[in-house]
Image: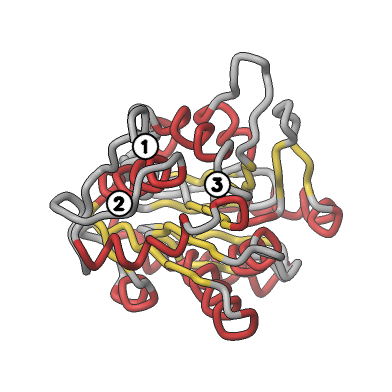
Amino acid sequence: MPGEPALVPLAPTAAALLAPLVVDPTATALITDFDGTLSLIVSDPATARPLGGVPDLLDRLAHEFAVVAVVSGRPASFLVERLGRTAGGTSRVRLIGLYGMEEAAPDGTVRLVEPAAPWLPVVAEVAGRLRVDVPAGVLVEIKGAAVTVHWRHAPDAEAGLLGRVAGEAARTGLVPHAGRASVELRPPVGIDKGTVVQSLTEGCRAACFFGDDLGDLPAYAALAHRARVDGAAVVGVAVRDAETAPEVLAAADLVVDGPEGARAVLTWLESAARGGRPSSGTGVPAP
């Protein structure tokens, strides 16, 4: 029909997997990680930026789908800075940081979940100790209710840093979580990307999650639970690069190459939801 958007072409198997998500967008949740998914992995975490056009794309998707959310290990304030707000100062996109311990309100203000609040001074003390005498190239990043130790620029320091982090975990009760050339200590509050995805998809008949790292595995498991228990149509998308763990690829239904591949799938979903008919062609490869 005249005026209908043209669909971004996808490989046939990818289009078939994604088609159930656009049968009724108003009952579908789209959830994505940030680093390695909407943004390239960079050597300095502070310099990470979303790919061009991604903030506006997410906002447009949020006008078509029941839920559009970014769930990241980053602080929610970081997501607000990087993904921005609409001209009116608010956004329909839910920005959830620290694996679910923080969420930005539509006006950009950030709320920390109550169980994490008592752990703020503990995390600060641990970060202070970890910053003492770290090898050159190691970054100790404090995120409020979590602290991450990065050794991408000092790979030989990994074993020693893991030992120090394990010692802090035993001393304080903080829980270590492995990441890309990093390890993070978080409060034991029973919140992760899986619990967040479970909550965000409540009542939805279809859902999709985009991830790239070990911290995303609980999210894929939550999708599988929705499919098994509620009969929801779900698609787990792994955004692959040279560092992607095999467990992440195995957990996904669809594998795309890099944030560019994730952006292409999101663009396809937008055009399909706005009236294009799901079709196939060339573009995003199937796994």
Going by the numbered disc 1, the residue's amino acid type is: Asp
Q: Where 103 sits versus 279, above or below? A: above
Left/right of residue 146 with respect to residue 58 in the rendered view: right
Labels 1 and 3: the sequence-earlier one: 1
Residue nearest the viewer, comparing 122 with 143: 143
Residue 140 lies, in percent from the top left, at 51, 46
Residue at figure coordinates x 49%, y 65% from the top left: 215
Q: CA distance from mark 2 to mark 1?
A: 13 Å
Q: Residues within 10 Å of mark 1 (few under 14, many from 20)?
A: few
Q: Residues within 10 Å of mark 3 (few under 14, many from 20)?
A: many
Helix, strand or loop for disc 2: loop
Going by the numbered disc 3, the residue's amino acid type is: Val
Residue at figure coordinates x 32%, y 51% from the top left: 152
Residue at figure coordinates x 19%, y 59% from the top left: 11
Residue to which mark 3 is pinned: 70
Q: How is the image coloured?
A: secondary structure
Q: Which mark is residue 156?
A: none
Q: CA distance from mark 1 to mark 3?
A: 21 Å
Q: Where 96 sits versus 178, above or below? A: above
Labels 2 and 1: the sequence-earlier one: 1
Which of label 1 and label 3 is nearer to you? 3
Whether residue 30 is visible here, answered yes or no, is yes
Going by the numbered disc 2, the residue's amino acid type is: Ala
Q: Where 68 sits versus 44, above or below? A: below
CB atoms of marks 2 and 3 within 8 Å:
no
Residue nearest the viewer, comparing 97 with 208: 208
Residue to which mark 2 is pinned: 154
Residue at figure coordinates x 58%, y 36% from the top left: 63
CB atoms of marks 1 and 3 within 8 Å:
no
